[in-house]
Image (spheres, rainbow, N blue to C red):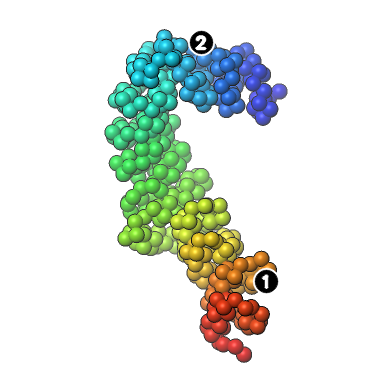
Amino acid sequence: MSLYQLEKDGDVDSLLDHLKLSDSPSIRKRAAKILGDVVDDEPQAVDALVRVAQEDDDEEVRGAAIDALDAIGPDAIERLVTEMAGVDSDGADWVRAEAFVKTLSADRPELRMAAANALRGLGDAGALPALVETLDDPNPRVRARAARACGAIGDESAADALAARLGDPVGHVRREAADALAAIGTSRALSPLLDAVDDDNDEVRYAAVMALGGYQGPEAIDPLIEALDDDSDVVRRAAVFSIVELLAAAPTEQSHRIRETIVDRLESADRSVVDPLVELLEQSRQPRERRNVAWLLGRVGGDEGYEDAVVALIDALEADDGTTAQFAATSLVELGGETVERELLDLLEDAECSETAQSKAVFVLGKVGGERARDRLENMLDRTDDEEVRKQAFAALSKLGGRR
């Protein structure tokens, strides 16, 4: 049976057999990784992984076992380190932290890796200087885990050392450094990521682009706009999400300038931009994000993705947040066209359409509608008792030439 099927079935016993008995390092490595995903602190599995982490003759398998123990939980990874370092697992946190710091200097890289992982679990800021030194470890797997631990502790004092790791020759280390800087999240930590959007590793670019959504300053705009043309679809989508996050978090005095700068840079966007915006508008539960997406869709939507943008904006007319609904309406006016008119007329025929959404739809039809809209609005005046809808219908008809 394949490892994929064993993973799907959660067959821990068979996975352990592959981990312990297979002659193939790649199979043992994969089995270890899967065990980290499916095991929930089962003693038999933890025992086997602890043994493999110390005794397997392949360094990648040993590393996978360490990562699997880390995935299972802090107790599992600490058991490995305490066993290898001879530390009392029931000792005080500071005692264990001191032992783990000493273990960062161990001869075996697996032991240094496990110590970094254990310190990450403890989150002890007192271990940060030793972890920063470990960022220069000769083994890239140790450097990567030290970077991850620095990010978990989240102290800005590690930012400069992590920024230096963005130039590491190993892509995985650069990715962990980028993630760690993103986790710290201060301007000092995020600034080095402005250049990391040009890294030749997709994962590093993705990490940098995702992090820059939290950067407080206009310097992030151009790198994020450039990332919209990235060869990687994942990076392009991340750029869209970060641009929206940047807009949502921008101080009031900067938001208008940032919006206009972004729209000026985007001009006519293709589906790689429109599709993630539509997804955010449909799925986000953050009002500020949805407002900015609704606003953007009316200003960056080109021919590609036009109809999807229209449908999403019309759905947003029902938003509980009035500002989101209003931005959706103004964006529909910006987009215009027969599709907007047709979809809005269909909305007005929907018996479940709220009166608020009807009012917004009528407003838009007054801006973009034709003869069909005019006929429908005249009929509406004769059928609705809602004063706000009637008011909007009169105003819309006046823009379309008045009642006949």
348 left or right, relative to 283? right
Question: Secondary structure beneath disc 1?
Answer: loop
Residue kind at label 2, given as amino acid type:
Glu
Residue kind at label 1, given as amino acid type:
Glu
37 left or right, relative to 185? right
Q: CA distance from mark 1 to mark 2?
A: 71 Å
- 40 or 210, nearer to the observer: 40
Residue 378 against residue 249 in the figure, above or below = below
User: Percent position (x, y) of residue 243?
Assistant: 43, 53
Labels in figure, total: 2
Residue identified by numbered label 2: 55
User: Percent position (x, y) of residue 76?
Assistant: 50, 20
Residue 368 shows in the view:
no
Q: State the residue lying farthest toward the right.
A: 1
Q: Residue at x 53, y 56 (%)?
A: 281
- 396 or 367, nearer to the observer: 396
Q: Which mark is residue 297?
A: none
The picture quadrant where one finds residue 42 is: top right
Q: State the residue lying farthest toward the bottom.
A: 404
User: Percent position (x, y) of residue 391?
Assistant: 54, 80
User: In the rendered structure, which disc, 1 or 2, sits on the residue that comes first in sequence?
Assistant: 2
Q: Residue at x 28, y 33 (%)?
A: 157
Q: Nearer the viewer, mark 1 or mark 2?
A: 1
Residue 54 against residue 6 in the figure, above or below = above
Q: Residue at x 66, y 26 (%)?
A: 10
The picture quadrant where one finds residue 49 is: top right
Residue 253 against residue 88 in the figure, above or below = below
Residue identified by numbered label 1: 349
Question: Secondary structure beneath disc 2?
Answer: helix
Instruction: For the C terminus, give its image quadrant.
Output: bottom right
Q: Residue at x 30, y 36 (%)?
A: 156
